Image (cartoon, helix red, strand yellow):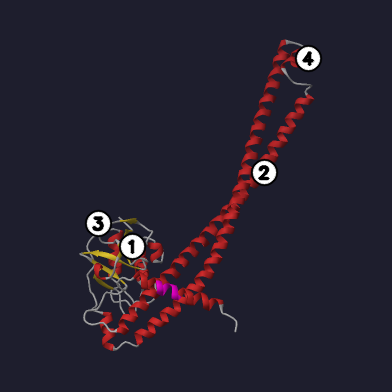
Amino acid sequence: MPINRTHVLRSALVVTTALSTAFIGGVPAAAQPTGSVSDAAKRLRELSRQAEVLTEDVKKSQDDHAARQRELGAATAAAHQADLVAERARGEEKRFRGQVDELTAASYRGARLNTLSTLLTSESPRSFLDRATAVEALARDNNQMVQALATATRRAESAQQRAADERARAARAEADAARLRHDIAIRKEAMDDQIAQVKQQYSQLSSAEQGALSGDRSDVSPLAGSGVAIAAVNAALGKQGSPYVWGAKGPDEFDCSGLVQWSYQQAGTSLPSSTRSQVSAGTSVSEDELKPGDVIFYYSTASHNGIYIGGGKVVHAPTEGQDVKVENYQDIGEVHSIRRMAG
């Protein structure tokens, strides 16, 4: 029976992620519910963590693909513009070359127009001065045309080189985009399989277990104040109770990075869509420097995040079976890093 390469790659990716998660350890994306936790609920959290990692991997690849597409468009436009500049410069070069040729020919027709020949062929001092002035003007004009010709030639060559460089950059961006499209397809298939396992495992939980997993809802009021960070916090707080959906970016359903991106977008700040990309945005701050609006990333994979609201609390979209809520930030998991996106 022939081997399905995509299935093999997909299976390998799931197994690798599962193994890495086993070695990574740490607390699951959702806060631990109080009381006893059944083996089924523990298994659900394991599967959810693995699915979360895969989901953020897919979104990171999508971010990268979009960046390569933008680079391709910019490089193509720059190459076209450079071609236009080169075309105009070549036209100037042709014009100046013609003028240089005409002035050079005029010099020859003038029977070696120089000071000595002008003096010997002049009938009077006034005639000499008139002719000498003409010789100097001819020489000056010729020199200016030669310089203009050289400048036009350099401009044309430089523009042609820029066009060639931009076309090469566009080709690299196009190749990268194609590779990322393939990568996204493989990763998404693995992600979809993993999410299907999570949903199946969740459906097997009892009503009591599902209730324990979902935990208490939060109802935190908006913060007073102004600025981008406060606006982002209040946008996220306004979504308390919205359901968690894998890969969702709002406005009614969210995953963790989707909530962060959407909230900052409402505040007028653009962020990438994945935790993998968001973790490089803004500036790094320590836990001692935390203030409302800072984004806290969790686990060694930085696969989960939420927005700090102050008082040791964070608003986030936890995981399958839970809604957007406010929790103690230290109860969620091991802090990977903190980024300040505004202010």
Q: Is residue 278 above or below residue 160?
A: below
For label 2, count other residues whose C-alpha is less than 10 Å away and answer few (under 14), some (14-19) or many (20+).
many
Inspect the image, locate mark 2, and give the three-letter code of the amino acid beneath it: Arg
Residue that mark 4 sits on:
121
The numbered disc on residue 90 is: 2
Left or right of 167 in this view: 64: left
Location of the C terminus by quadrant is: bottom left
Q: Mark 1 or mark 2, which has the lower sequence index?
A: 2
Q: Classify residue 298 by image quadrant.
A: bottom left
Of callouts 2 and 3, which one flags the residue occurring earlier in the amino acid sequence? 2
- Where residue 112 sits: x, y (%)? 77, 21
Q: CA distance from mark 3 to mark 4?
A: 90 Å
Q: Which mark is residue 267?
A: 1
Q: Secondary structure at mark 1?
A: loop
Earlier in the chain: of badge 4 and badge 1, it is 4
**C-beta proximity under 8 Å, tags 1 and 2:** no
Label 1 vs label 2: CA separation? 49 Å
Residue occupying the point 59% across, 48% down: 162
As for residue 16 lying within the magenta part, the answer is: yes
Magenta stretch: includes residue 186 = no
Give the residue type at disc 1.
Ala
Q: Residue at x 30, y 77 (%)?
A: 323
Check disc 3 and give the amino acid type: Glu
Q: Give the magenta range.
A: 14-19
Query: In the image, which is nearer the foreground, mark 4 or mark 2?
Result: 2
The residue wearing badge 3 is 289
Circle nearer the N terminus (3, 4):
4
Instruction: Report how far apart the C-alphas of labels 4 and 1 lie in the structure.
Output: 84 Å
Please tell me whether mark 1 or mark 3 is closer to you in this view.
3
Marks 4 and 2: CB-CB under 8 Å?
no
Q: Amino acid at mark 4?
A: Thr
Could you say which disc has been placed on residue 227 in the image? none
